[in-house]
Every structure is written in C-alpha cells, then in structure tokens.
Image (cartoon, helix red, strand yellow):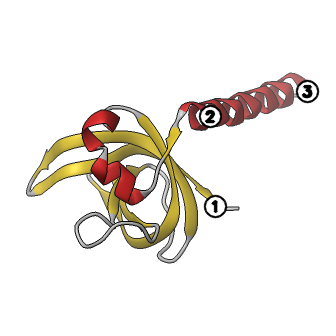
Amino acid sequence: MRGIKLFMAALLTSAVLAQSTIADEAITKTVAAIHAERAQLNGQLVTIKGKIVKVNNGIMKRNFLHLQDGSGSEGTNDLTITSQQTASVNDEVIITGKVILDRDFGLGYNYPLIMEEATISPAK
C-alpha cells in the first residue's frame, strides 16, 4: 500500500512538473499579437491570459472555448481554443497551447487560427 501511495505521489509530481515545463517553454502573447503574428507562431506553444467568453463542451471529443483579453478589434479580439479541460464563461484563466493555422475539423468546423491541446489554469 505504501508503495502505491509513493508511486501515485511521484506520478502527480511528474505531471505537475511536466505542465510547468510546457508553460515555461511557451511564448506569452496577447490575442491581438497571436492574430498579427500567426504565421510565425504556427506550431509553437503560446501562453495567453484572459477571460473565457464562450464554451462548447464535448464537441468531437474536445471542448471549444473562446478567450478575449481586451486586445485587438473585431476579427482579432477573440481566440478559439480546444482542450480536454474546460472553464466557465467569465473565468479568468491562463492557457497554454499550440497555435495552428487553417484547421479543418470537417462538418463546417473550419478555423483559420486556433489554439489546440491547451492546458487551462486559473489566473492569479
């Protein structure tokens, strides 16, 4: 029993450290900057802080969230994010994920810019 507890503690610690490492390797940007620098950021890990303004959970085995941070204008002030995690509308969050261009999920889900495989944590 003690061995199982130690294993679980080590596993949890590894997961936390891995998430921290991923966030440490990411570039921090605003929503407007991600839109403006989309070509350079394609495929890169990016961290962003903002407010969740829309949530659609459980679509194609992922959750779709929209984040705004007060930057940008119409067309560049909102970022669509996919994650296995979720948040609620009005939550202030920090999100780290991979910027992807021209993502076509099929069934009319086409995104010229999207952040995928994101981790979500509460903003501090």
Circles 2, 3 touching at the beta carbon (< 8 Å):
no
73 horizontally vs 111: left or right: right
Q: Residue at x 50, y 38 (%)?
A: 27
The residue wearing badge 1 is: 122
- Asked which secondary structure carries label 1, the reply is strand
- Asked which secondary structure carries label 3, the reply is helix
Please name which of the two marks, 2 or 3, marks the residue nearer to the observer. 2
Q: Residue at x 22, y 67 (%)?
A: 75
Circles 1, 2 touching at the beta carbon (< 8 Å):
no
Q: Picture coordinates of residue 35 (x, y %)?
A: 29, 53
Q: Is residue 90 above or below residue 5?
A: below
Q: Residue at x 25, y 37 (%)?
A: 39
The residue wearing badge 3 is: 2
In the picture as drawn, the residue positioned furthest to the bottom comes out as 90
N-terminal of the pair, mark 1 or mark 2, is 2
N-terminal of the pair, mark 2 or mark 3, is 3
In the picture as drawn, the residue positioned furthest to the right comes out as 2
Query: Looking at this view, is 91 or 86 the one in front?
Result: 91
Q: Picture coordinates of residue 65 (x, y %)?
A: 38, 62
Q: Which mark is residue 24?
A: 2
Q: Tell me the amino acid under the disc marked 2.
A: Asp
Q: Tell me the amino acid under the disc marked 3.
A: Arg
120 horizontally vs 116: left or right: right
Q: Residues within 10 Å of mark 1 (few under 14, many from 20)?
A: few
Q: Which mark is residue 14?
A: none
Please name which of the two marks, 1 or 3, marks the residue nearer to the observer. 1
The answer for how far apart the CA atoms under marks 1 and 3 are is 32 Å
Q: Tell me the amino acid under the disc marked 1.
A: Pro
From the image, which quarter does the C terminus lie in?
bottom right
Residue 8 falls in image quadrant: top right
Q: Is residue 113 visible?
A: yes
Residue 116 falls in image quadrant: top left
